[in-house]
Amino acid sequence: MMDKEKLKKMAENPGFISGIYNYCDRWCEKCPFTSRCMNYVLCEGQFGDPEANDINNKKFWDRLSEIFKLTLEMVKEDAAKMGVDIDAVDLEQVKEEEKRNGETCENNKCVQAAKAYYEMADKWFKSNNSLFEEKADDIRAKIEMVLPGANPEAEFLELKDAVEIIGWYEHQIYIKLKRAVSGTLRDTIDEDISDANGSAKVALLGIDNSIAAWGILRNHLEDQRDRILDILLHLSKLRKETEGTFPGARTFIRPGFDK
Ligand code: SF4
């Protein structure tokens, strides 16, 4: 049973990289830092048995609720040390500000372009379901033929990875950019936009990976070269726009990943 002291002790473990999970892409399955990430150990360690991994499982939600309460207690304690009374926050005012910020975020050029990107990507995948089936048949036939110099298995894996990468980042780019833009609105008060830059960097890395993945699809899918080129051009513009809006993003140091 996890308690507040245990959680605090865990957080003090020097083996963990402080805040590494704040600026990652949440792709734990592919992450080289799982053993140094408190978030991963806390979730996987606690929910490690298959039963607990089921999001419909009561145990999962009970544990989450327990961690939520402990975290809230810790936040209250830390806020009190800083002289902030969480209970005195004017929620109506906060709600109004959030609404205003939400509208400003949605109207931001980068956020709009990121939204347009995931809509384009979704549309492309929906209209090309059969294309992947045809490609799979084609690869199966190549495997049976055993052509010299051909490596259909590698071709299959390359395509599978590319599809997975695009799927992983397509909505995340939008979410991270929204967070980055909203960070600039919040952070103008203390002029510290490092968190916004961190989120923008994660979005940029997602864009880079997606560009590479679409490039792979384009190489393999002859008939789709023009349509994929449109998507690549859109992503390249989004990349440029994001770099222009967040000039400090590329040089932002993500704990663990960049040092
Ligand atoms: S740092 Fe790695 S292990 Fe931790 S949450 Fe991010 S992707 Fe997952």
Image (spheres, rainbow, N blue to C red):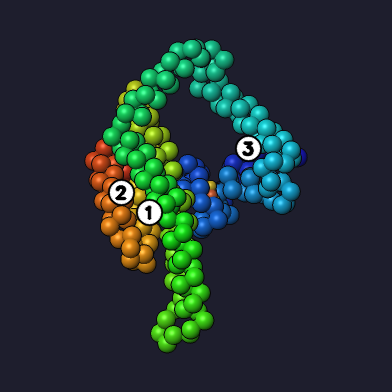
Real-space Cα distance between discs 3 and 1? 37 Å
Q: Mark 1 points at which residue?
A: 210
Look at 54% across and 18% down and name the residue there: 86
Q: Mark 2 points at which residue?
A: 235
Q: Earlier in the sequence, mark 2 or mark 3?
A: 3
Amino acid type of the residue that numbered disc 1 sits on in the rendered structure: Ser
Q: Residue 8 got which mark?
A: 3
Residue 55 percent location from the top left of the image: 66, 42
Whether 164 is drawn above or below 53: the answer is below
Look at 36% across and 64% down and name the residue there: 221
Within 10 Å of disc 2 (Cα), the crowding (few <14, some 14-19, many 20+) is many
Real-space Cα distance between discs 2 and 3? 42 Å
Whether 68 is drawn above or below 166: the answer is above
Residues 113 and 92: in front is: 113
Residue 212 percent location from the top left of the image: 35, 59
Q: What element carries label 2?
A: helix
Q: Is mark 1 on a helix, strand or loop?
A: helix
Q: Earlier in the sequence, mark 2 or mark 1?
A: 1
Look at 59% across and 48% down and name the residue there: 40
Residue 111 percent location from the top left of the image: 34, 36
- Ligand 1 contact, mark 1 (Cβ < 8 Å): no
In-image side of 244 versus 96 (left or right): left
Look at 66% across and 29% down and name the residue there: 69
The answer to whether marks 2 and 1 mark residues whose Cβ atoms lie closer than 8 Å is yes
In-image side of 17 versus 200 (left or right): right
Q: Name the mark nearer the viewer: 2 or 3.
A: 2
Amino acid type of the residue that numbered disc 3 sits on in the rendered structure: Lys
Within 10 Å of disc 3 (Cα), the crowding (few <14, some 14-19, many 20+) is few
The answer to whether marks 2 and 3 mark residues whose Cβ atoms lie closer than 8 Å is no
